């Protein structure tokens, strides 16, 4: 376990990297004994400082929930981070690339809760009952830690590499559509780069919501009504540069478009 002073120092490094859009050396290269618990403590310090500075927490992201993403990163268990209101964009947005250290895009579904959800034995059915609606979403990944050789400790410390989210306009209740078979066809500048279906996320995209509720219980917390839960990608991440136009077709759940400027 890291000393509290080290946790605070790393959180300060990450906050500065966020402010300057820089990248810091791997935490695990400098603190090889750092644990997953340490990484969530680092993330927690960074989160609480942002809330104290006036940012509003609107939800959580779950990452590394699909085989595609686990293989892409070499990481074998999910993680989570927080989302603030100033990181949420609507379809059609122009997104400044200078806000990020680097930009990759993932295809996901997001869920808005109508009731609180808590573990320790939360099931998929419990999660579906707590969900108000699903909405298509693109996640903008933003890593403040060097990518080569990252472990889950590095990723969690860096708020699970969350940068921003672009949400679509189509809302579906879980009983209106079989969410497992929502497709995603991701294009960059008119060329298809990635495809997938939402079942690639733990067999059902809402399974991650149940996982998160159970994980939160370990920390003495729960998911609250009104929170947005970004449930994990069912494609590999796609690199994006300034000037790129991104489009994702979710079939019955509509289309998301955005442009990076």
Image: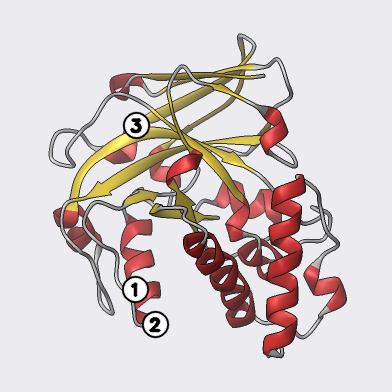
- Residue ID for mark 1: 214
- The quadrant holding residue 105 is top right
Bin the neighbour count of mark 1 within 10 Å (Cα to Cα): few under 14, some 14-19, many 20 and up. Answer: many
Q: Which mark is residue 129?
A: none
- Residue ID for mark 3: 182
- The correct choice, above or below, for 93 with respect to 110 in the image is above
Quarter occupied by the C terminus: top right
Left or right of 57 on screen, residue 191: right
The residues tagged by marks 2 and 3 sit, at their Cα atoms, a distance apart of 31 Å
- Residue ID for mark 2: 218
- Residue 144 appears in view: no
The residues tagged by marks 3 and 1 sit, at their Cα atoms, a distance apart of 25 Å
Q: Are marks 1 and 2 in contact (CB under 8 Å)?
A: yes
* Front label number (2 vs 3): 2
Q: Nearer the viewer, residue 24 or 254?
A: 24
Image point (52%, 59%), residue name: 53
- The quadrant holding residue 236 is top right
Compare marks 3 and 1 and give the one earlier in the sequence.
3
Secondary structure under badge 3? Answer: loop
């Amino acid at each position: 376990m890291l000393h509290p002073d080290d946790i605070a120092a790393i959180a300060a490094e990450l906050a500065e990297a966020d402010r300057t859009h820089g990248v810091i050396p791997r935490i695990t290269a400098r603190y090889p004994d750092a644990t997953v618990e340490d990484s969530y403590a680092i993330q927690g310090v960074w989160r609480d400082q942002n809330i104290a500075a006036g940012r509003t927490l609107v939800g959580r992201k779950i990452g590394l929930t699909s085989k595609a993403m686990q293989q892409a990163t070499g990481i074998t268990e999910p993680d989570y981070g927080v989302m603030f209101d100033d990181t949420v964009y609507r379809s059609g947005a122009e997104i400044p690339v200078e806000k990020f250290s680097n930009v990759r895009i993932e295809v996901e579904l997001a869920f808005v809760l109508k009731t609180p959800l808590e573990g320790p034995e939360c099931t998929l059915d419990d999660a579906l009952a707590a969900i108000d609606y699903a909405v298509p979403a693109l996640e903008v990944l933003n890593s403040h830690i060097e990518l080569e050789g990252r472990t889950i400790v590095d990723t969690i410390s860096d708020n699970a590499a969350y940068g921003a989210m672009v949400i679509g306009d189509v809302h579906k209740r879980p009983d209106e559509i079989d969410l497992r078979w929502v497709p995603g066809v991701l294009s960059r500048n008119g060329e298809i780069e990635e495809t997938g279906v939402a079942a690639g996320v733990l067999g059902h995209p809402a399974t991650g919501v149940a996982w998160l509720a159970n994980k939160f219980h370990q920390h003495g917390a729960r998911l609250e009504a009104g929170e947005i839960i970004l449930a994990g990608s069912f494609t590999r991440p796609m690199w994006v540069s300034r000037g790129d136009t991104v489009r994702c077709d979710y079939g019955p759940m509509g289309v998301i478009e955005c442009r990076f400027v």
